[in-house]
Image (spheres, rainbow, N blue to C red):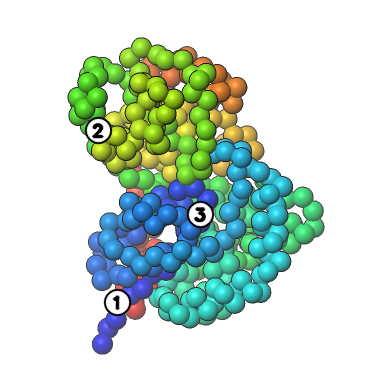
């Protein structure tokens, strides 16, 4: 008797971008393989995962990779992150045994990782096919942001060896170059498409139809906004992914709108974010201008900004400008001139074409 194919999705807990990359692919896999059983392993809140996946799944709150420690949404706590990663690697053998035992229990037909790496080595030990899917890898990030000495060099070498254990490393555009990985394959951008609900949003809050909406999307890392220094601007309202607070009537919390994040993004006149794959890809593929924080230490930044300039509209705001709320000139610049057409998000189809054969053959 044929059994339903089983996919283990191992997702990093560093923000929501890793989930955002893979969720559209998993949803598309379900449409192609309706009987597919998906188990999600990670430490993201279950409700956040459920908000992205279209069908029922099994959820295991298991941390499979170290997570960078952050001062806020865009600044890494380097000493704390270094301690976390070094501790993870010093307990390597016990951790690898944990992962191989997990795979023995779950018996998946395929491991899809974005982008925990030790689970890829465990899959090789268990002779289970594995695919990594991400626009970056933690070896590159750690090298750029945290590496200090020979212990770190050995740690990075182990990470790369794990990534090489995967059958494929699928990198959605715009991705970091990864010349160290011979299994690296580029695919198109991965992003959801939203529906503009501008009139509905304006009506709900008794706002003029010409109101400018700017969405704040700084990822899944808690960050305090310096609202006391942000001036009000006539005809402009902020859409915040958390409650507005501070008694500002020019802020609307996402929960107050009754709309999904992707529809709010498609409704917005701009998105205020930081360099990171998920919001960039979804903004460009929905034709929404990007106002991004400067993030010179993050290795993806030049690739993301170059790609956004080629296919959309992007302006960079410095940390002091952000703190002082000096947004006006940059936003006006984004709203000047013709808007480029939304970019096709064809990476989902590319990914499914690479992943589905590992599952359909079961």
Specify which label sits upstream in the sequence, 1 or 2. 1
Find numbered disc 2 in the image and state the secondary structure of the residue it sits on.
loop
**Residue 112 appears in the picture as rendered:** no
Q: Which mark is residue 75?
A: none
The residue drawn where x is 29% and y is 34% is 256
Identify the element where label 1 is drawn: loop
Q: Position of residue 14 (x, y in %)?
A: 53, 50
Which residue is tagged 3? 13
**x and y percentages locating residue 122 in the rendered image:** 55, 74
Residue, x 43% and y 79% (percent of image)?
107
Left or right, 317 with respect to 349, comes to right
Does 181 appear above or below 16?
A: below
Q: Earlier in the sequence, mark 1 or mark 3?
A: 1
Say which residue appears at 24% left-offset and 67% top-offset.
Answer: 34
Q: Report the number of discs.
A: 3
Q: CA distance from mark 1 to mark 2?
A: 38 Å
The dot on residue 4 is 1
Quadrant containing the N terminus is bottom left
Disc 2 target residue:
196
- The answer to which of 97 and 317 lies nearer the viewer is 97
Other-residue count near label 2 (Cα within 10 Å), few / some / many at <14 / 14–19 / ≥20? some
């Amino acid at each position: 008797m044929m059994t339903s194919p089983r996919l283990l999705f191992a997702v990093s807990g560093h923000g929501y971008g890793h989930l955002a990359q893979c969720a559209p692919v998993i949803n598309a896999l379900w449409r192609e393989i309706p009987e597919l059983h998906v188990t999600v392993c990670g430490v993201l809140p279950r409700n956040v995962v459920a908000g992205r996946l279209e069908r029922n799944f099994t959820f295991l709150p298991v941390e499979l990779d170290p997570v960078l420690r952050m001062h806020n949404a865009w600044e890494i706590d380097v000493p704390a992150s270094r301690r976390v990663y070094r501790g993870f690697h010093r307990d390597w053998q016990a951790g690898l045994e944990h992962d191989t035992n997990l795979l023995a229990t779950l018996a998946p037909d395929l491991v899809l990782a974005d982008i925990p790496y030790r689970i890829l080595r465990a899959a090789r030990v268990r002779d289970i096919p594995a695919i990594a899917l991400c626009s970056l890898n933690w070896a590159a990030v750690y090298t750029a942001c945290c590496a200090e000495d020979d212990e770190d060099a050995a740690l990075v070498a182990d990470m790369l060896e794990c990534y090489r254990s995967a059958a494929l490393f699928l990198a959605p555009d715009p991705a970091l170059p990864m010349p160290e990985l011979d299994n690296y394959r580029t695919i198109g951008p991965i992003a959801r498409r939203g529906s503009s609900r501008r009139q509905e949003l304006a009506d709900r809050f008794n706002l003029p139809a010409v109101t400018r909406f700017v969405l704040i999307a700084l990822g899944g890392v808690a960050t305090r906004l310096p609202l006391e220094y942000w001036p009000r601007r006539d005809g402009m309202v902020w859409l915040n992914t958390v409650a507005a607070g501070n008694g500002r009537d020019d802020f609307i919390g996402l929960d107050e709108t009754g709309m999904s994040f992707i529809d709010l993004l498609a409704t917005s006149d701009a998105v205020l974010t930081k360099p990171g794959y998920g919001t960039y890809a979804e903004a460009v593929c929905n034709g929404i201008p990007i106002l991004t924080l400067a993030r010179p230490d993050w290795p993806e930044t030049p690739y993301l900004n170059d790609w956004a300039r080629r296919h959309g509209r992007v302006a960079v705001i410095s940390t002091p400008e952000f703190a002082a709320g000096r947004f006006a000139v940059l936003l006006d610049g984004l709203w000047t001139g013709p808007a480029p057409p939304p970019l096709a998000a064809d990476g989902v189809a590319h990914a499914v074409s690479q992943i589905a054969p590992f599952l359909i053959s079961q």
